[in-house]
Image (cartoon, grey):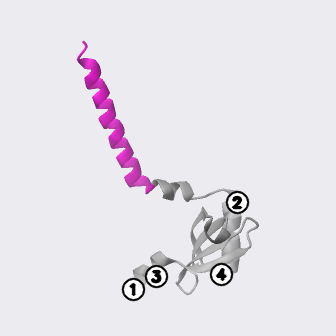
Amino acid sequence: MKRRFPIAVASALVLAAGGVGVAQAVGGSENESAERASGPEADRATAAALEITKGGRANSVERDSENGATWEVEVTKTDGKTVDVRLDRKLELVVVEGDSESQDADE
């Protein structure tokens, strides 16, 4: 009877470790999922970014603090180029930058 307890604990730890691995594989990195944003504020940030780029498709929206921004919206513009639109808390433009991931893929 005393031997069952350590085996049960070890089994539970193995299952828990496996679950963490699956969650990371399916959900991406911990930082990535924590940054993704949704809801009415994220929708307004997306709309503001699309207005700035004069259309296109919003690929993602996330909270951001780079360059003093509050929001970063990745937009694929109508010409096919992908940019990061950074907005402040009032949804005003901070900067539009070329998206380094899409630039790396083009090289």
On-image quarter of the C terminus: bottom left
Earlier sequence position, callout 3 versus callout 2 = 2
Marks 3 and 1, Cα distance to the nearest angstrom?
Answer: 7 Å
- Magenta-tinted stretch: 1-29
Residue marked by disc 3? 103
**Callout 3 secondary element:** helix
The secondary structure making up most of the magenta span is helix
Give the image location of residue 61, x and y in percent.
60, 65
**Callout 1 secondary element:** loop
Marks 3 and 2, Cα distance to the nearest angstrom?
Answer: 28 Å
On-image quarter of the N terminus: top left
Q: Is residue 19 magenta?
A: yes
Q: Is residue 100 above or below residue 23?
A: below
Give the image location of residue 67, x and y in percent.
64, 72
Residue marked by disc 1? 107
Q: Amino acid at mark 1?
A: Glu
Give the quarter of the image for residue 88: bottom right
Front: mark 2 or 1: 1
Q: Amino acid at mark 4?
A: Thr
Assess whether mark 3 and mark 4 are in contact (beta carbons under 8 angstroms).
no
Residue marked by disc 4? 53
Assess whether mark 1 and mark 3 are in contact (beta carbons under 8 angstroms).
yes
Q: Is residue 25 above or below residue 14?
A: below
Earlier sequence position, callout 1 versus callout 4 = 4
Q: Amino acid at mark 3?
A: Gln
Earlier sequence position, callout 4 versus callout 3 = 4
For this view, does 3 lie left or right of residue 55?
A: left
Which residue appears farthest toward the front when viewing the image? Answer: 67
Residue 41: numbered disc: 2
